[in-house]
Amino acid sequence: MRPPVALSIAGTDPSGGAGIHADLKTFTALGVYGTTVITALVAQNTHGVSRVYGIDEDFVADQLAAVFDDLPVDAAKTGMLGTRGLVELISAELRTRRPGRLVVDPVMVAASGHRLLDADAVDAVRTELMPLADVITPNLPEAALLLGDDVPAARTPEQMRAQARELLARGARAVLLKGGHLDSGELVDILAQGTDSGPEFLEFTHPRKDTPHTHGTGCTLAAAVTAGLAAARRADPAEPLGEHLPGVVETALDYLGRAIASGADWELALDPEGSHGPVDHLVDIGIAGGRGTASTGTGNRPPEGAASTPSTAAPRAAEPAADQEASA
């Protein structure tokens, strides 16, 4: 017997809300054994990023070897990668070592405006990493940048569908496009999957939660999807991705909504002015103990080619104008 194993390839967050710290908490909360490969040491907190210290490519390669040579990775996720060299190295390693499933969270810019991915690395994400992904999880600005330097971010669910369709055409097997930047009364996330008959879309809607505490939400959602895929892969390695992905996404969105709601009134920062605090990753466990379980869920999938079915996920907070996701 062994638990599902998930790997996070990302940067650090000493304040504990984003990056590998958020990922490990999420993996634990959802009953998955977590492992990490650190790509950057990031000096950040709930107020923003002050400095990024890159990790040598050779040492990142050594970390990848340490994990893959010893442990069966049921699912992996990439977050902050930083440089073109690291994107190319990690893409080559994942192409060779291939985890059971791969989630790509294309982290690019922190809320403070600090770039977390070099400009010349974006093309490598498009051409080297994205085609390896089972799921990519961009927000609206990230999706636009993946499609081209001059592409505007989607402003409506219809535009989101069009951009998700184009991202599928660029090589991703599935796209979870996060709509937190939409100027609407509710949040909309769209899951697009490629099928033999064309793209299939599933729309999840959530009431907005009025809270500034959204630090690490992108990391947390991608980690929750990774945990669900790891659990599904461990349970049945032969099951096609499309059979369990909608349920995995629905469960991940519900977990994130409850984590945001639970941490919405936290007062962690010494100076609350301008602070974007973390979510409560242990909402299902509690500080005193207990355990949570990753679920592949059942989803609300429409027939192939159909429109979409609204989700009943818990309320979520809107993403800040520039994501407070930092080193996802």
Image (cartoon, rainbow, N blue to C red):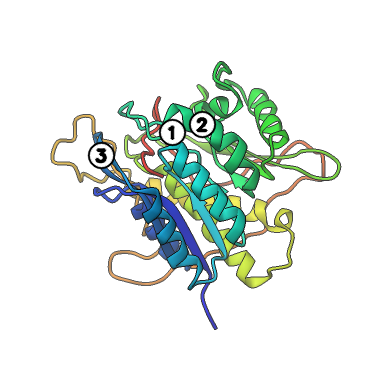
> Mark 2 and 3 residues: CB-CB less than 8 Å, in contact?
no
Marks 1 and 2, how far apart at CA: 8 Å
Marks 1 and 3, how far apart at CA: 18 Å
Name the one closer to the observer, 3 or 100: 100
Image height of 99 relative to 288, above or below = above
Residue that appears at 24% across and 49% down: 14
> Mark 1 and 3 residues: CB-CB less than 8 Å, in contact?
no
Residue that appears at 55% across and 41% down: 137
Question: Residue tagged by mark 3?
Answer: 46
Question: Residue tagged by mark 2?
Answer: 122
Left or right? Give the position of 259 relative to 275.
right
Q: Position of residue 208 (x, y in %)?
A: 46, 34
Amino acid type shown at disc 1? Met
Query: Tag 3: Cα neighbours inside 10 Å, few (<14), some, or many (≥20)?
Result: many
Query: Tag 1: Cα neighbours inside 10 Å, few (<14), some, or many (≥20)?
Result: many
Q: Reading the chain from its start, which is encountered first: label 1 or label 2?
A: 1
Q: Position of residue 104 (x, y in %)?
A: 54, 45
Question: Residue tagged by mark 1?
Answer: 108
Q: Reading the chain from its start, which is encountered first: label 2 or label 3?
A: 3
